[in-house]
Amino acid sequence: MEPLMNQPPLTRRDMLALTVGSGVSFLLPGLDLHAVGKRGKERPKSLITVWLAGGPSQLETWDPHPGTKNGGPTKAIDTRIPGLKIAEFYPQVADEIDSLSVIRSLVSQEGDHERGTYHVKTGHRPNPALVHPSLGAIAAYELPDKTVEIPLHVSFGGGQWPARGGFLGARFDAFRIFEPGRNIGNMQRPVAKDRQKRRLDGLDILSREFRRGRRVVAERTLHKKTIDRALVMMNSDQLKAFRLDEETKTVRESYGDSRFGRGCLIARRLVEQGVRAVEVTLPGFDSHTGNYEAHRENAAMLDPALASLLRDLKQRDLLDSTVVLCIGEFGRTPIINPLEGRDHWPNGFSCLVGGGGLKSGVVIGETDPNNTDKKVPPQDPIEIADLSATVLQAVGVDPAKTFATKINRPIDYSDGTPIARLL
């Protein structure tokens, strides 16, 4: 589905083409507003994924090794988790990291960007026979309700390989927004109310004519459902969750004036509204050259935004009902290459995970910066499948549940085992 941001107004022909041809995530059922109004552990679970696109270096984020041969110039700082040090670029996260746990020994068999992204976002390695749904799509599918009038699965900041619905269907693809905080295109009618009604009446005549003798085909297009849900969304007060004008200047500034910072702030607003899954992408971690500088520049956006998100979720009593996962597709090599960069390294990398009832302050594994042999695993290795199973269980989905695809092929949501130390 193409993004609906900053586009010219739709004509009747555009609307017809869009609704017939698109995978529309706002067809999803919503949540019970009474449940959404609750706080703490009684509130329905949501997932916020902070996606660090390109593969962040473990040595420049959550597992630094200063003073070693391959540690580079990055210094380490103390955190609120006793004994845990992280890269110097993250002083604000260091003060909030005790709300999460740190895994520093993730292992993956995928060292290519596209395949690695697929693996981490779905918990499965790519398979040419089918497309697996992302964790956010599974949450939206498995935990439905009927009153949220905005998409239940949202993605901010773009990216080449967005979170998809896979075998659950295209309508569970993430609703993509490239410029968080700006008005969503095509969500305000460009004409007066009476003229819009005439247009819709005309469209209804065309729809009825198309339906004659084509009932099954017409139903498959989801045309009428799409129009109905689009109109509900266009007139919903819940669209305000995508805007920032209700937030104070102090709050906006705490997240940082960047696309990523605005995305993290809106992510908090969306889960507060009842959205199931939000992904916020920060690109720029593919640091084959100038690794240290690239991570320092990205940290200037990641540090305030992630710390403010965690602080906000705690203050609003939303962290117990919101799983936060900060991760990329793999890590970077211990060896610094001749261009002062680090290359792809799936054999020992880091992530932050917590909230949603998961244990906090747990540190699992570590990497050896002197180990450059991919055949030698890090201390206490954690498979991607086990991480995905942990996230699913935390949001309230049985990771071992079997789904029957359209061809009645049984597929488990996860092949992994939840990490007992985090539950």
Image (cartoon, rainbow, N blue to C red):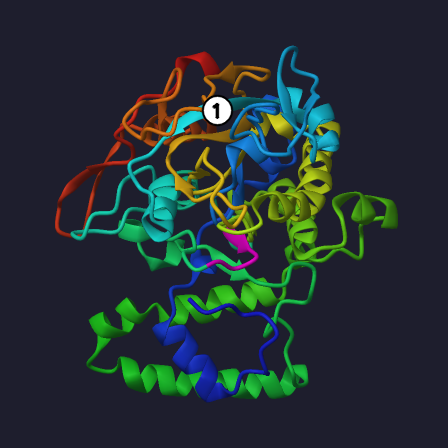
Q: Give the side of residue 222 with respect to residue 402, left or right.
A: right
SS type, badge 1: strand
Residue 182 is situated, as x and y percent measured from the top left of the image, at 69, 65
Kind of residue at badge 1: Arg
Examine the rendered structure and indicate whether residue 299 appears above or below residue 378.
below
351 or 246: nearer the viewer: 351
The residue at the point 53 percent across, 23 percent down is: 102
Residue 151 is situated, as x and y percent measured from the top left of the image, at 52, 54
369 or 158: nearer the viewer: 369
The residue at the point 37 percent across, 36 percent down is: 346
Q: Which residues are magenta?
A: 153-159
281 or 276: nearer the viewer: 281
The residue at the point 59 percent across, 35 percent down is: 60
Can residue 148 be seen by looking at this rendering? no
Residue located beneath label 1 in the image:
104
Q: Is residue 155 magenta?
A: yes
Quadrant for the N terminus, please: bottom left
